[in-house]
Amino acid sequence: FKVTGATRPKPRWRARLTERPMRYDSALVSGSPPARAAMLVATTMLLLAVLAGAAIAGAQLLGRGQTHVVAADGSGDFATIAEAIAATADGDTVLVRPGTYAESFTVRTDITLRGDGPREDVVIAPMRSDVEVVVSGEEVVALGMPVGVDLELVDAVIERVELQAAVPMVGFLANGGRVVLRDVGVSTAETDGKANGLSLLVAGGSSVTATDVDFGQAVQVREAASLAIDESVLAGVLEAEGPGRIDVIGSHFAAGGGLQVSEHATGTVHGNVFESATVVVAGASEIELRGNSFTDAAATAITLTNEGSQAIIVGNDVRRSNAGIAIGPGTTATVTDNTICGNQTNLLASNAASTDIHDNVISETCPGD
């Protein structure tokens, strides 16, 4: 009695799981092995459900950033974009209501900056800023022009806004981090009738994805950075220096623009329209041109030059230009399944180049002309 009285009885649920059963028949009755197994499974499932619910709730809680509303008329949380960004933390959203915002700013948190409406209704009009540097090689040198939006080592999304600068400048500077530009327009002022600014400068190992973006001026990719462009318009030259990478799909290179890759740059260029625009592959770079159309270039539509440069040129339509394709000495090119027609010189390949040229349609007149 003394020992029994000192022993604390087990809870009923625990006894059913741990005590030896009173009966060993296979019926699903209290204390039988099937009942014990069923209760163990039910308890395990309940525990897993509780833990899963806690994990989901925790993830939702951690991922729920704040939204900061910017309105020029004072009806939002902030009157300027810069003030709103200064108040953000990683994961927040800055929602900009229609209006014109004459300001430049720097983004140092991982945020989404979104226009509240069509992009032409939300205008960022940058003024001169204190950010006037760009990385060149391994040195930081003065750029000589201001920066509109400085994205400094951040993972940020910019969408549904127009950046319209009244002075030549770098519209967006991505210097480290990952940036997404979506449904954005960029234009800066010209000097003496020339577009002196840059719509976008990608440097410092940044990775930028641009979808449905109108680039009014040149775009540069430097310093092991990468740029992927999809369904966009480029009015200026897209220039990539290695070891950077560019990938351009389904976009429109307008007159006076084009693509220049150098210093061991790499990339793919698929399904684009080059309207009076050209491609130059130089400096031991490697590029794949596939399914593009080239028309009415005042110079050579596609130029492969400098020792070690390589190009795969497949399935393109190259017509009515000063010259179609020029392959320089010391380069390597595969040219197949292209239509090259109506150019003053359709195809010129150096004897000192390594070429694989076959199955192309080359003629003085173009089909359908």
Image (cartoon, grey):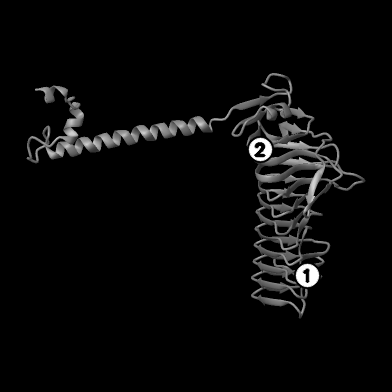
172 is higher (above) or lower (below) than 352: above
Q: Residue at x 79, y 30 (%)?
A: 102
**Quarter of the N terminus within the rendering:** top left
What residue is shown at x 70% (from left), y 77% (from top)?
354
Badge 2, how many Cα within 10 Å: few under 14, some, many 20+?
many
Determine if residue 109 is in view: yes
Dividing the picture into quadrants, the one containing residue 54 is top left
Residue matched to label 2:
159
Q: Which residue is mark 1?
A: 306
Left or right of residue 78: residue 296: right
In the image, 319: left or right of 69?
Answer: right
Q: Residue furthest right?
A: 192
Q: Quadrant of residue 85?
A: top right
User: Label 1, label 2: how many angstroms apart (C-alpha)?
Assistant: 39 Å
Amino acid at circle 2:
Glu
Of helix, strand and loop, which one carries label 2? Answer: strand
Q: Please, what secondary structure does the residue beneath circle 1 have? A: loop
Which of the labelled discs sits on residue 230, or is there none? Answer: none
Of residues 276 and 217, which is closer to you in this image?
217
Q: Position of residue 313 (x, y in %)?
A: 67, 67
Relative to 273, say whether 166 is above or below.
above
Specify whether residue 217 is in view. Answer: no
Q: Residue at x 64, y 39 (%)?
A: 157
Question: What's the residue type where badge 1 is placed?
Answer: Asn
Name the quadrant of the C terminus: bottom right
